[in-house]
Image (cartoon, rainbow, N blue to C red):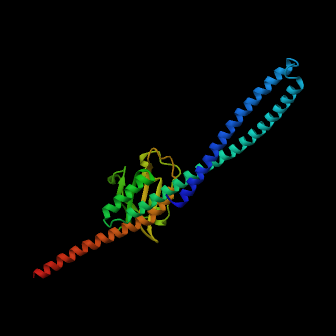
């Protein structure tokens, strides 16, 4: 457990201990107040019934006044403690809220770190693509989406991977064509606040388009069509993931493709050298 979390935990324990002690003290005061109230009632009944030869009216009257004074003091203390307990409860609620926020931030940072580590853990192109799909499903919570990669020869965005939508359903998109092509050409992310209502509209007006960039060089686009049913809207960490995907996923894809091409060329050259050596 980190030093920051340890201090927060110790502070929380102190708050809870203060709260428990305040509760116990308040209960004791309430019991004493109830006893004094009962004694006051007894004395009032005695005074109403007339002078008591054995005890004496002046003494009973003085006892009544003294007990009334003590009851008033205890009631004042109880009100003061009630106010302090209310303040402690508010501090406890605020502490609990901040603790939850810290835990959520820690979880988000851990998820971002894991996602970044996974993206750069392999140079196999197929594995990198699969990792990107898993990040989009598990961390962002998308149900239907696609990954387009730029074909520089045709200047088109070619679907390379998808989930919830078959690759055969997705057509290549020319740069500047529609919302996806425009987002790719302008190299800016697109967010749709009004989700498409029909499946045909998914491909024309998706939820999100995230250009994959290495500096100013476009590698491809991630397009989200539909979120999982339990995910109502994007959380702040989702936008952090979008930023991560825009850079790290692009770098991972570029490195994997470059490595695959170099391996193919190496195999070709090695085969050519083997033919020459046989002659």
| Residue drawn at (48%, 59%) of the image | 109
Residue 228 or 159: which is nearer the viewer? 228
Where is residue 173 shown, x and y percent of the image?
39, 60
Where is residue 249 shown, x and y percent of the image?
41, 64
For the C terminus, the image quarter is: bottom left
Spot the residue most to the left: 279
Total marks drawn?
0
Describe residue 168's horizontal placement relative to residue 89 as left or right: left
Describe residue 26's horizontal placement relative to residue 55 as left or right: left
Residue 6, quarter of the rendered image:
bottom right
Q: Is residue 278 visible?
A: yes
Spot the residue most to the front: 54
| Residue drawn at (61%, 50%) of the image | 14
Spot the residue most to the right: 58
Where is residue 162 shown, x and y percent of the image?
36, 54
| Residue drawn at (17%, 80%) of the image | 273
Residue 126 or 48: which is nearer the viewer? 48
Describe residue 54's horizontal placement relative to residue 115 as left or right: right
Residue 40 or 79: which is nearer the viewer? 40
In the displayed structure, 189 sits above or below 268; it is above
In the displayed structure, 56 sits above or below 170; it is above
Where is residue 92 shown, x and y percent of the image?
62, 47
Residue 124, quarter of the rendered image:
bottom left
Residue 203 or 238: which is nearer the viewer? 238
Describe residue 50's horizontal placement relative to residue 221 as left or right: right
Q: Is residue 176 visible?
A: no
């Amino acid at each position: 457990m980190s030093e920051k979390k340890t201090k927060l935990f110790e502070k929380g324990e102190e708050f809870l201990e203060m709260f428990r002690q305040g509760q116990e003290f308040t209960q004791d005061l309430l019991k004493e107040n109830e006893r004094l109230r009962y004694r006051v009632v007894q004395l009032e009944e005695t005074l109403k019934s007339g002078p008591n030869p054995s005890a004496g009216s002046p003494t009973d009257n003085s006892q009544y006044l003294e007990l009334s004074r003590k009851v008033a003091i205890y009631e004042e203390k109880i009100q003061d403690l009630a106010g302090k307990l209310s303040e402690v409860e508010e501090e406890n609620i605020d502490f609990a809220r901040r603790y939850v926020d810290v835990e959520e931030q820690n979880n988000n940072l851990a998820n971002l770190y894991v996602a970044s580590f996974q993206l750069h853990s392999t140079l196999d192109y197929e594995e990198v693509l699969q990792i990107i799909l898993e990040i989009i499903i598990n961390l962002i919570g998308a149900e239907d989406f696609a990954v387009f990669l730029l074909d520089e020869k045709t200047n088109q965005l070619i679907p390379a991977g998808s989930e919830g939508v078959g690759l055969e359903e997705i057509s290549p998109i020319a740069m500047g064509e529609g919302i996806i092509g425009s987002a790719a050409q302008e190299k800016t992310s697109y967010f749709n606040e009004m989700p498409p209502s029909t499946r045909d509209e998914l491909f024309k007006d998706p939820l999100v388009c995230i250009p994959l960039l290495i500096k100013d060089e476009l590698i491809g686009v991630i397009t989200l069509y539909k979120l999982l049913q339990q995910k109502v809207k994007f959380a702040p960490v989702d936008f952090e993931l979008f930023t991560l995907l825009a850079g790290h996923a692009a770098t991972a894809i570029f490195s994997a493709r470059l490595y695959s091409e170099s391996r193919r060329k190496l195999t070709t050259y090695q085969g050519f050298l083997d033919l020459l050596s046989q002659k």
